[in-house]
Amino acid sequence: MAKRFDVAVVGGGIIGLAVAWRARQAGLSVTLLERQGTGEATSRVAAGMLAPVAEVEFGESGRRVLDLGLRSAALWRSFAAELEEASGIEVGLRRSGTLVVARDADEARELERQIAFRDSLDLSTERLLPSAARELEPALAPTLRLALQAPDDHSVDPRLVLAALRRACELHGVVVREHAPVAGVEYDGERVTGVRLEDGDSVLAGQVVLAAGAWTSDLGLPPGASIPVRPVKGQILRLRDPAGPGLLNGVVRFHGGYLVPRGDGRYVLGATMEERGQDLHPTAGGVYELLRDAHELVPGIEELQIEELSVGLRPSTPDNAPVIGPGALDGLVWATGHHRNGILLAPLTAELVARELTGAVAVS
Ligand SMILES: Cc1cc2nc3c(=O)[nH]c(=O)nc-3n(C[C@H](O)[C@H](O)[C@H](O)COP(=O)(O)OP(=O)(O)OC[C@H]3O[C@@H](n4cnc5c(N)ncnc54)[C@H](O)[C@@H]3O)c2cc1C
């Protein structure tokens, strides 16, 4: 007779892996089903900013994402330490803060509005004049007009996190199945019974977590039980300074993009935001815009070597807030729609979903 798992997690990105690890730690038997290799989709492309304060947006869903982001950011330090201990892989957590910069009068006016907004929310930020900003980051162009410092917005290397989560899952007994595309959720009346694979095989499970990122809406669910998740395309460059580290100390964000230093002479320059469906093609226009904007602010990037150009699809709901918690069927749990913040939100998502799965505390 086929083995029945307590939990089947669909999708092996940062969200699915983190959920599977936490659920297994909570004592549940867990299988994770990934249609390609784990960590090969959007999470691998992400820059790795842990930036709830720099990212905060106006409006109700902006507040909700901020609340989740601040809670998850507070977990990151211990999450990283625990993961490193469990896997033996360092995850590249850098606590170096973020500088948001304005390069002309229009951008400076907008940044003043953003500073006032963050002040109204009592967020920890500082308004910096150009001279003070350039003291922190001497590579910034002298034309800089204004800056906002978010000292608690940090960064991590998502590729190291994915490798560590994968290792931790395996060491803790999560049954990871790669190249196992899920065709749909199976249910009996109002209760899920497992998932159906594309090859016709079934996996029996008492609960099913949907963490299939930008492809979550493709999973066969009964009418009314699905949620709309659309892909938002992002193009991103990975650069290396042949002279070694030192061009930038912390994350620098500007209108249209950001530069994230890894601390070893490598930098991530991202990212476009494009509504192009499932299109994964990089474009000359996308790369041009990224390099043009970054070069205006950090002219020294012209010496950097290009290591990689990649494209990812952010899983995004209509209001761009994630969906974490129980679905319309008994035993169905959502962990998707993390849009621009899936790396930041991974620790909290995993904790909330594990609580839901064990019935410990209602997800809030
Ligand atoms: C350019 C770019 C930069 C970003 N930068 C940041 C950042 O700095 N900080 C931050 O917090 N976030 C960032 N993000 C957002 C972040 O990458 C995402 O929110 C996060 O990766 C989503 O994780 P996920 O596990 O839901 O999705 P994914 O990593 O896409 O994982 C989903 C997995 O599900 C699998 N899957 C899909 N369908 C099926 C199926 N039917 N059966 C089995 N498996 C299936 C896929 O193959 C995939 O491996 C960025 C995104 C982009 C595109």
Image: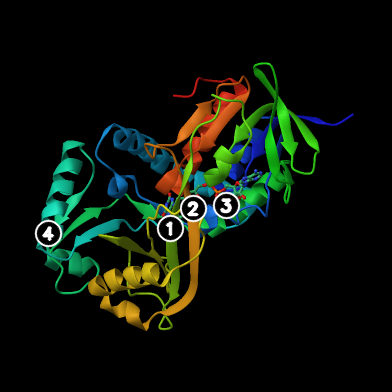
**First in residue order: circle 2 vs circle 1:** 1
Q: What residue type is labelled 3?
A: Glu
Q: Does the residue labelled 4 lie within 8 Å of ligand 1?
A: no
| Residue at disc 4, secondary structure | helix
Q: Which mark is residue 10?
A: none
Q: Name the residue under label 2.
A: 313
Image vertical order of residue 337 relative to residue 277, above or below: above
Q: Which of 269 and 81 is in front in this view?
A: 269
Q: Which of 115 and 110 is in front in this view?
A: 110
Asked if disc 2 and disc 1 are in contact, CB closer than 8 Å, the reply is: yes
**First in residue order: circle 3 vs circle 2:** 3
Q: Is mark 3 within 8 Å of ligand 1?
A: no
Q: Is mark 1 within 8 Å of ligand 1?
A: yes
Residue 265 in the image, given as x and y percentages of width and height:
42, 74
Q: Identify which residue is drawn at 33% across, 77% down.
A: 301
Residue 48 visible (yes or no) = no
Q: Name the residue under label 1.
A: 234
The quadrant of the rendering that contains the N terminus is: top right
Q: Which residue lies furthest to the top in this view?
A: 189
Asked if disc 3 and disc 2 are in contact, CB closer than 8 Å, the reply is: no
Image vertical order of residue 217 relative to residue 1, above or below: below
| Residue at disc 3, secondary structure | helix
Q: Does the residue labelled 2 lie within 8 Å of ligand 1?
A: yes
Local packing at callout 4 (Cα closer than 10 Å; few below 14, some 14-19, many 20+) is few
**First in residue order: circle 4 vs circle 3:** 3
Image vertical order of residue 214 relative to residue 184, above or below: below
Residue 201, quarter of picture: top right
| Residue at disc 2, secondary structure | strand
Q: Mark 3 points at which residue?
A: 84
